[in-house]
Image (spheres, grey):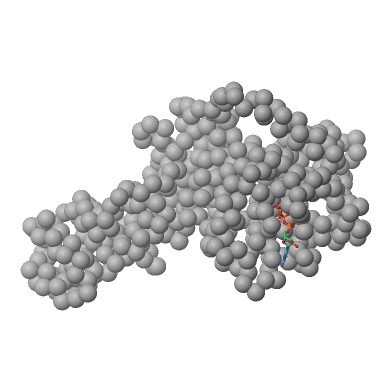
Amino acid sequence: MAILDKTQGHLVLRIVYTGPAHSGKTETVRHLAQLLLGKALDDVVYSPSEAKGRTLFFDWFDYQGGIFHDYKIRCQIVTTPGQDLLRARRTQLLADADAAILVIDSDEKDLSSARGHFDELCDTLARQDYPAALLVQANKQDIDTAHYPDEIRQRLSIAEQIPILPSTAIESLGIRETFIKAVGLAVAEADNLFQQQLLPTGQPDVDSGDDLLALIHNQEQALQQDASSTKEPLVEQRHIEIPSFSASHLAAGFVWPPLAGRQLFRQLQTLNPSIESCGEERWQSHFEHWQLQSQAVFAQGLAAKRHWIEALKQYNRLLPQLAPDCAVFLLKAETGDWWLWHITHSGESLVEKIQLILYQNNPSEVAAQLLEYSRLFLELYDVFSKAKATYLLDLEHLSVGDKGLYFHGFLDLHTENAAHDALDFWHQQLRTYVPIDNDLPLDVPQTLNALTQNEGEAAVVEVLSAWLIGE
Ligand SMILES: Nc1nc2c(ncn2[C@@H]2O[C@H](COP(=O)(O)OP(=O)(O)OP(=O)(O)O)[C@@H](O)[C@H]2O)c(=O)[nH]1
Ligand SMILES: [Mg+2]
């Protein structure tokens, strides 16, 4: 992690290029060294060991440029080996990263190794006390069949706040931009710590490629000796008193979406909502159309940050189906405990909408609207099903927006699918939340007739008919 070396007058940062084997990490840093230093490559990039062009340890070079509060910025630029078998070594090399650049081969047909390495990297970062900034370098853009960054974002469900930059390392294109962006993010985080007087000072443990190689060797030996000893879980969840919002502060970088979420947090702080327990390790507050829920409290930042990454994955998976005003953030209370909060805003409730439909006395209109809501529900169910999250779907948590239905409940931190048939589930939800009452002005027989006019939707009509006759 960033360190202020006062004797040398340096801010030392580590920028790590990681990603699948063959994606172009070594090529990137060799061309970057030439761009930044203008020297012959072999003089500046230190690559301890290679096997048929595959990096076995890392590539390393040093670059000094830019100023940080009167200190010169010194970047240690490192690559990791992409081979699957060298995962442990990759993780070690990422341990002190201030920015991690995931270099992927944009020409890979199904992007499966990129996906695997993205998940692996998120996992590694989530275990760090101060997670490195994350960027993606979509390399090999020169190949005709390469995927563009937007397509990569969509296919790999990469959150908007993670930059994806295109590059063609063999032609030195795009690599300077990615590097500058990475340094910018790392410096911003260092500044954040500096302002809070949390930026460490001293000499970096690793000052050269040789130092790094020695460190890796030592760590690998120590790991081998430790292999048989079992590891303690890192933290336990505890049950403690809920803190007030006004006495908490937002941890840097732990608000999603970054701008709107921060505004929302400030707004909530001024409203100082009263928070009550709602079962084991859950706290909530409801006011107006806002709902707040905390699912977990952590004694250490590390576990909280792991959950943070998991929560973000869930939010990004289901983003288009979520309430327009929702946010998630990690709060640190004065007690030092960390809280993961979800905030959401509900709109017009689907249950109320359906109840209103039943009060109309126009059978063909009623049939048309019921079919339309069924269609919207089934579409939403399909999306949740792909995200393995149908267990979250409940009519009570659905609202009607301009673009259809959206979910305003809370995303749990696990994914699994209850095995339901979508139509059975819809039927069961209608029966639970909108039971048919004999006092309704609705002409049920005429409505059933109107429904059966809709050929081609027989299965939905059958479910709606069963519900309308109280089955
Ligand atoms: N067409 C094309 N080829 C590239 C590009 N970048 C790298 N390559 C080629 O891809 C191959 C692998 O590149 P490396 O830089 O060695 O890959 P690496 O990610 O370091 O691989 P490991 O060390 O095994 O993890 C080499 O043959 C490079 O010349 C690019 O932008 N376009
Ligand atoms: Mg390499």
Quadrant of the frame with the N terminus: top right
**Most distant residue in the front direction:** 52
Q: Quadrant of residue 49?
A: top right
Tell me which residue sits at (59%, 34%) in the image: 301
Q: Front-most of 292 and 103?
A: 103
Q: Front-most of 359 and 84?
A: 84
Quadrant of the frame with the C terminus: bottom left
How far across and how far down the image is residue 226, in percent?
A: 64, 25
- Horizontal side, residue 411 vs residue 83: left or right: left
Q: Front-most of 373 and 93?
A: 93
- Horizontal side, residue 94 vs residue 122: left or right: right
In the image, ligand 1 is in what quadrant? Answer: bottom right
Q: Quadrant of residue 457?
A: bottom left
How far across and how far down the image is residue 15, in percent?
A: 75, 48
Is 312 above or below relative to 372?
Answer: above
Is residue 75 visible in this depiction of the protein? no
How far across and how far down the image is residue 372, in percent?
A: 27, 69
Is 323 above or below relative to 273?
Answer: below
Tell me which residue sits at (76%, 41%) in the image: 2
How far across and how far down the image is residue 266, in percent?
A: 55, 47
Q: Front-most of 163 and 21?
A: 21
Tell me which residue sits at (70%, 27%) in the image: 222
**Most distant residue in the top direction:** 229
Please give the count of numbered marks on the rendered protein. 0
Q: Quadrant of residue 283?
A: top left
Is residue 38 visible in this depiction of the protein? yes
Is 232 above or below relative to 163?
Answer: above
Tell me which residue sits at (83%, 36%) in the image: 211
